[in-house]
Amino acid sequence: MHQLGDNSEALREQVFEYARTRLEYNPPPLDGPQSPEFLRAAAGKTITEAGIGGTAALNVFAEVLAPATISTDHPNYLSFIPSAPTEASKLFDLIVSASAIYGGSWMEGAGAVHAENEVLAWLASEVGFGKEAGGVFVQGGTLGNLSALVAARHSAKRKLVQGGKQMPGKWKFICSEEAHSSLKSAAAVMDVEIIKAQVDQFGKLTGAAVEAALDGNTDSVFAIVATAGTTNFGIVDRISEIAQIANANGIWLHIDGAYGLAGIISPGSRELYAGIENADSFIVDPHKWLFAPFDACALVYKNPAIAHEAHTQHGDYLDVLTETGDWNPSDYAYNLTRRPRGLPLWFSLATHGIAAYREGVKYNIDLARQIADVIKSREDLKLVREPELSVVVFEKQGWGINEYNAWSEKLLARQQAFVVPSSHHGKPNARFAIVNTKTQLEELVKILDSMNE
Ligand SMILES: *Cc1c(COP(=O)(O)O)cnc(C)c1O
């Protein structure tokens, strides 16, 4: 029995109609989570031998499952780092889904890979890398950081082998105490050590701190990671100082810009990233602040040949691909089968032009400054740090975690906003992460007002 191909035209129309409804939400519903018990009872059994039928399954999704998810592109979704894809990028994601395009190899996906590479080349040029730079869109920043660090260690190993030198007992990399948790995960997976360098009073990793961390470790440190936009505060490390030390010691410099490297395209913010052209690799997540849908991280190497050597998988059935000399995206990260997930961004960039992206990012940076000014003007609020990009962190006088939690729950319950508490050095605070061009100052002010109800 072969019934898998027999989708009715009616179902196709129902699905397109529902997709249209979702695309036309303005704003999308915030909604919110439900308990497993609730969902089990409300959704009923959907996976059965006979199947429940597409119409029934679509109804379960529309009426039960979707309302139990939070729309990250609601303009007042300000927690974590949200995602606010353009309509063009969402539309093209539908096309990617409607086409079974394999994005891992040139042989199978040349056209898609060409378009993805055009976007990567643009990002590389914004950073100041040369024409030979290249990389791949991986699932997320966690995988991007891991893949870059694996390439960095491979490069360090190769140098030692070529120099006839001994391998260190334990490989290490340096990052700041404000760096993202994914680096700790990468270190655990790679079985390497992290040397945590201190940040200065502005939350930035400095050249001096890296130099101190490097002291006595030059033989075992294979990478230095600078963060271009910390997740907590949106602070950019002092890249030019750090790059000088990395370059002088022949150590790979990786830039973790998953959230904040997008800020480099904003007119007026470029100097925050000075010296970044001297790095060896970077990541930036289009699903964070380049208005693209989940899930995409652009991973770019200055010298992709080393990454190729570190990551290419060899196997009898793959050699027909790997031995061609073609550009195969799979060979540049810890991945093999991949969706051409850079295409939604490609389409949206091609549609709107780079200038619209520069304006979108700048709008968010300006908005963060404006709401920071409002916070500073209020006696009951304290701005924890001046925002550099689009994250604003503040405290409410006299509040402990219970007050923040109650406030956060109230905002979601009445579908006004999604703002979960954060903390700094053990002290709870409120945090706005602004990456949506539909977010409005008046709405942010109302959220501040709601703390006094
Ligand atoms: C979000 C983030 C990551 C992890 O990216 P994912 O796409 O969530 O895996 C890494 N580094 C920084 C600085 C981040 O903000």
Image (cartoon, rainbow, N blue to C red):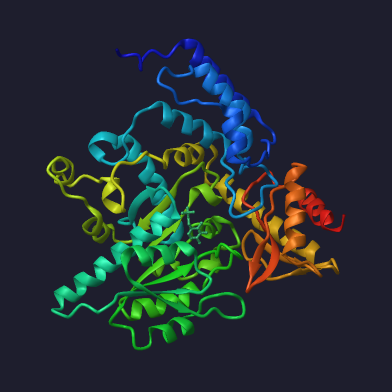
Between 439 and 406, the one nearer to me in the picture: 406
Which quarter of the figure has residue 306?
bottom left
Q: Residue at x 52, y 72 (%)?
A: 237
What is the x, y in percent for residue 180? 49, 64
In the image, is residue 171 above or below residue 301? Answer: below
Assign the N terminus to one quadrant of the image.
Answer: top left
What is the x, y in percent for residue 234? 59, 64
Q: Residue at x 73, y 50 (%)?
A: 409
Give the left or right position of residue 221, taking residue 98 as reference.
Answer: left
Between 311 and 255, the one nearer to me in the picture: 311
Between 117 and 77, the one nearer to me in the picture: 77
Give the left or right position of residue 426, taking residue 264 as reference.
Answer: right
What is the x, y in percent for residue 316? 12, 43
Which quarter of the figure has residue 164?
bottom left
Q: Residue at x 33, y 53 (%)?
A: 134
What is the x, y in percent for residue 181? 48, 64
Give the left or right position of residue 382, taking residue 91 as reference.
Answer: right
Q: How many marks?
A: 0
In the image, is residue 186 above or below residue 80? Answer: below
In the image, is residue 26 above or below residue 242? Answer: above
Residue 47 shows up from this direction: yes
Assign the C terminus to one quadrant of the image.
Answer: bottom right
Give the left or right position of residue 82, taking residue 373 as reference.
Answer: left
Q: Residue at x 58, y 56 (%)?
A: 266
Residue 125 shows up from this direction: no
